[in-house]
Image (tube, grey):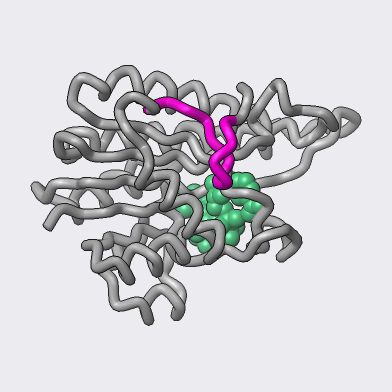
Amino acid sequence: MSLTVVTGSNRGIGLELCRALAARKAQVLAACRAPSPELKALGVEVISGVDVATDGGVSALAAAIGERPISLLVNNAGILAQESLADLDVTSIQRQFEVNALGPLRVTASLAPRLERGAKLAFITSRMGSIADNGSGGYYGYRMSKAALNMAATSVAHDLKSRGIAVAILHPGFVRTEMTARHGSVEPAESARALLARIDALTLETSGTFWHMNGDVLPW
Ligand SMILES: NC(=O)c1ccc[n+]([C@@H]2O[C@H](COP(=O)([O-])OP(=O)(O)OC[C@H]3O[C@@H](n4cnc5c(N)ncnc54)[C@H](OP(=O)(O)O)[C@@H]3O)[C@@H](O)[C@H]2O)c1
């Protein structure tokens, strides 16, 4: 059976995506930097040491997959920090670019040869990366890195279409995870269920669309 691969799988939305996929009897490969007890308890295949911002981490993931085909890749790993214009922390912004924008692109490029015909790719982005939706400013690194991710994912959608591979660019909602200090309007499990519903509905015709997990199409 072909693999479903999820990055950032040890907690939050990534953990719940793995739980929901395992419940469907998918062949899950959970990639993380370090496994959590909750992830270990799922009983899925876990590959640790996968820092998406490093060549070594991405190579370790590719090596663990070997020649096995992939039917679904979810680029979920991400970080959020806050910067202010008055005290710009450029290093923080660069780090978010490395993890949020370049990380998913590195993983996708590395695993693209393993994606089977008809496979699906999901990029977990944020509506905070939408320029049209930016009504409050700030969050330079997060907003800029997710906008860059949206552009990268759009190019991937074009580049892989001829192989029958469809791409979903997904905002998971305002989710109660460590990233939001448990603030939010939805639980990670509910977000994961909705994200999988979007991925299920994804077709080549709708590839490259930027969706809210509730199904609304979001503006760029
Ligand atoms: N929560 C929300 O409201 C919300 C809204 C919009 C978008 N999102 C997006 O949803 C995705 C999941 O976020 P979450 O809410 O589940 O946050 P979370 O609980 O903070 O989880 C983030 C995940 O990303 C992993 N990660 C961070 N840096 C990494 C790196 N360099 N390499 C590999 N993995 C790394 C973390 O692993 P470690 O434990 O090793 O750090 C963790 O598994 C992110 O892309 C985030 O931007 C979340």
- Residue 218, given in percent of the width and then of the height, sits at 61, 30
Quadrant of the image occupied by residue 103: top left
- Residue 192, given in percent of the width and then of the height, sits at 49, 58
Quadrant of the image occupied by residue 202: top left
For residue 18, above or below residue 104: below
**Who is closer to the viewer here, 75 or 85?**
75
Seen at 42% across and 52% down, the residue is 196
Seen at 73% across and 31% down, the residue is 140
Q: Is residue 79 visible?
A: no
Total numbered badges shown on the rendered structure: 0
Q: Is residue 38 visible?
A: yes
Q: Residue furthest left?
A: 67
Dominant secondary structure of the residues highlighted in magenta in the image: loop
The image quadrant where one finds the C terminus is top right
Seen at 71% across and 21% down, the residue is 132
- Give, as a single range, the part of the protein colored magenta: 207-217
The image quadrant where one finds the N terminus is bottom left
Q: Residue furthest right?
A: 86
For residue 216, above or below residue 206: below
Please indicate whether residue 61 sits to the left or right of residue 172 in the image: left
- Residue 146, given in percent of the width and then of the height, sits at 59, 33
Seen at 27% across and 60% down, the residue is 29
**Who is closer to the viewer here, 157 or 68?**
157
**Who is closer to the viewer here, 105 or 194?**
194
Quadrant of the image occupied by residue 49: bottom left
Please indicate whether residue 46 sits to the left or right of residue 16 in the image: left
Q: Is residue 58 magenta?
A: no
- Residue 25, given in percent of the width and then of the height, sits at 24, 68
For residue 207, above or below residue 200: above
For residue 65, above or below residue 37: above
